[in-house]
Amino acid sequence: MIYIKSTSEIAKMRRSGRIVYDTFAHLKPLIQAGVTTKELDTAAEEFIRSQGAIPSFLNYNGFPASICASVNNVVIHGIPGGQRLKDGDIISIDIGAVYDGYHGDACRTFAVGEVSAQRKRLMEVTEQSFFKGLEFARHGERLFSISAAIQEYVESNGFSIVRNYCGHGIGRNLHEDPEVPNYGRAGHGIRLMKGMTIAVEPMVNAGGFATKTLRDGWTVVTEDGSDAAHYENTILITDGEPELTTYY
């Protein structure tokens, strides 16, 4: 079931989204060579709680941390731990916060120090693919037009779009209908409606699109060992331009 949000629900989602955005701003200066992913997780949890919110991911279906910290060939769901970042790494940090019962969800991929030209381009294409899809996040448009725009941009730049994970509706629940794939046929799928809130999140691999899950049951890596990047925002469908509740 797709939930159309009321004015009061949207206000709460704007607040949770702003907390997610501010958490990224809090973490950004800490993302340096030598920091552990667990230290980033602790800093994020402390900040989210200081804003009167709760980390969305902590204990969600058993996930043991407040953020997902996915380094280099890790696509999504990297569990923070003792891994120390190195100069030249890239790290995708996925953050969720729930405020007064409503969630915000976003992801950014960061460079650690100076990264290779290939990694920089992967990050840029992944981010830009989101905004290509955003052009179709409008009342009356078909959902898969977002998906198709993302896929076309990613593949035209020589990268692969992950197929077996996707974006999602969001609101009172972290994951709601509809699923939002990052590939598809333009002009297909449900019609978007004013008041819908969706999380669109391209996951892009430098090599092939195939992935595998490690023995911890969470960490998803590229099957061929190539790098991956991830970019996400929570989007409110309006009667005009889409609103990003996690981007200011």
Image: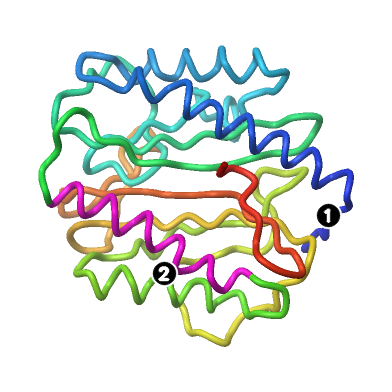
* Predominant secondary structure, magenta span: helix
Tell me the magenta residue range.
118-137
Provide residue 192's location: percent of width, then percent of height.
Answer: 70, 73
**What crowding class fits label 2: few (fewer than 14 Cα within 10 Å), some (14-19), or many (20 or more)?**
many
Residue shown at 42% from the left, 49% from the top: 231
Provide residue 158's location: percent of width, then percent of height.
Answer: 19, 69
Q: Quadrant of residue 240?
A: bottom right
Q: Amino acid at mark 1?
A: Lys
Q: Is residue 174 left or right of residue 231?
A: right
Q: Amino acid at mark 2?
A: Ile
Q: From this view, report whether residue 197 is shown above or below residue 37.
A: below
> Quadrant where the N terminus lies?
bottom right
> Quadrant where the C terminus lies?
top right
How far, Cα to Cα, is label 2 from label 1? 25 Å
Residue shown at 20% from the left, 54% from the top: 121
Instruction: Look at mark 2 in the image and give the residue it sits on.
Output: 150
Magenta region includes residue 37? no
Q: Residue furthest left?
A: 116
Instruction: Look at mark 1 in the image and give the residue it sits on.
Output: 5
- Nearest the viewer among 101 and 9 is 9
Q: Which mark is residue 95?
A: none
Q: Quadrant of residue 157?
A: bottom left
Q: From this view, report whether residue 81 is shown above or below residue 130.
A: above
Q: Is residue 100 left or right of residue 85?
A: right
- Nearest the viewer among 190 and 195 is 195
